[in-house]
Image: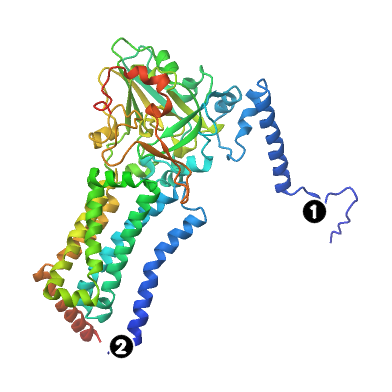
Amino acid sequence: MLIKIAKTSDLRESDVTPESVYLSRRRFMGGLAGLSAGLMLAGRVQAAASDYQDVPAGNPPGWFDSKLKEAEWDSVVPADRQLDKLTPFDDATHYNNFYEFGTGKGDPARNADSLKTQPWSVVIDGEVNNGGRFDLEDIAKPSRLQERIYRLRCVEAWSMVIPWLGIPLGDIIKRAEPTSKAKYVKFETLVAPDQMPGQDSSFALIDWPYTEGLRMDEAMHPLAILGLGMYGRELPNQNGAPFRLIVPWKYGFKSIKSIVRISLVEEQPVNSWQAIAPDEYGFYANVNPEVDHPRWSQATERRLPNSLFNPNIIDTRMFNGYADEVASLYQGMDLRKNF
Amino acid sequence: MPMPRYTFTLWRIAVFFAALVPLVYWGYQVAINAAGPEPGKYLLLNIGQGILWMLLLTLSLTPLTKLTRWKGFTLIRRQLGLWTLAYAVAHLFCYAVFILGLDLSRLGSEIVRRPYIIVGMLALLGLVIMGVTSNKWSMRKLGKRWKPLHKIVYLVLGLGLLHFLWVVRADMEQWVLYAAVGALLMILRIPPIARQLPKARQLAKRSKRAHA
């Protein structure tokens, strides 16, 4: 029989710091780092990721982590950050449309675990000199990650404010070396019914792959980005991991998720929603309070989260508030016809 | 075997509380912050589907009575009809408050401009007409005209399904389920088929006896 006599230097179980105390210390330190970032511009690069303290850590590939360290934080932010307060991470990740995972707003968060995002490659083809299949890492490599805090206006008349991390779409198009015939950019989402249960539904009206498109000058606009992350981390699966489009002056459905193919084309592509209901959803889908959806007004939006006592209904702004930057793209166009 | 009177009273009270359960559940979800970032829309959509459940349940009572001859089904018909109306009123309330922000001028313009709202309002109007004429006084007053008047419930079902169809954006599964149940309940009312229902009951009885 072994008799154990405790030595005075032995640690007893009761000496271990409880995890909650340890974690709260980390939170405290994180808070300090965030504070210093707000005060000192120089400290911004290292400190900013900890601005999103309540955001659970993801499981990013190593290359994303190293890009994150060099990210340019707050690269574009709303003019009035009180009015356009960030939507809580939990709401932005648990209330969205991603029909590949189901048509309910909670379905993407419930079902997107099955999506395999590593490795991920993207085909760039069509009217380009430098096309092919590229690893996502190689596509992202030459560009610095930028944080863009954008308003997101859904065509269903609700909106959020989301801090994206991405790279300018224009960078990627330039590197593909488009030919003179390239007039439009067409995007496609992954088709994988084994990972995306919504694509398995025989009642779905979308003809997969989900397809979107932009005119060349829209795609080259500096506000248009390809997103890799949000809230200081990589994209959660349900928000379009690992690679999605973000075009803040257009309705949310234009910002196609989980992209596997980018084609430069001569003809205007037919986007998925336009194919289903051409009288309700156009190619341009610019946010426009004066042009109603046939079934509801677009003059106002419900800024989320809201509550029963405060529906938080605000006026929708032309081009979602980005008119100064993008209105010139549509000069002389009848936006009622080209909705 | 005839049931004692109080059994039916208990049955009606039980149905009353059962019809209340969904509303309490959704309210509770909102109260504990489990209804997502847009609780008003959550209530609007769930109550909207609740109207269809109530309507389909109400419409299933006549075939069920024929099939079972149980008096209890007839006894709750008015109650479930009124629950359908109550759910519909709550649905409109949610739309006016949480979607339009009680901007009444917009309520007016939306009602005349949006076909699916018009259709929904017509269905509600049908429910209101049936609701206000569901009391004994109206039944006596309307006499023979009462029954044909309440046939507008079939129209309400059609309008309700159309209203829902317009809301569906990309997945027809739910709508097809509701429409299929609605169609079945309509088919069971076609006279030659409706006449078979009591016979089906007798057949079941006979085979039960044979097995005993």
Q: Is residue A182 above or below residue A338?
A: above
The chain containing the residue under callout 1 comes to A
Q: Is residue A272 above or below residue A306?
A: above
Name the outermost residue toward the left: B192
Give the image quarter of residue B75: bottom left
Query: Does residue B179 appear left or right of residue A231 in this picture?
Result: left
Mark carried by residue A270: none
Structural distance between the alpha carbons of marks 1 and 2: 67 Å
Nearer the viewer's eye, disc 1 or disc 2? 2
The chain containing the residue under callout 2 comes to B
Which one is nearer the viewer's eye here, B72 or A236? B72
The residue type indicated by label 2 comes to Met
Residue under pointer 1:
A14
Which one is nearer the viewer's eye here, B130 or A93? B130
Residue under pointer 2:
B3
In the rendered image, is residue A202 in sight?
A: no
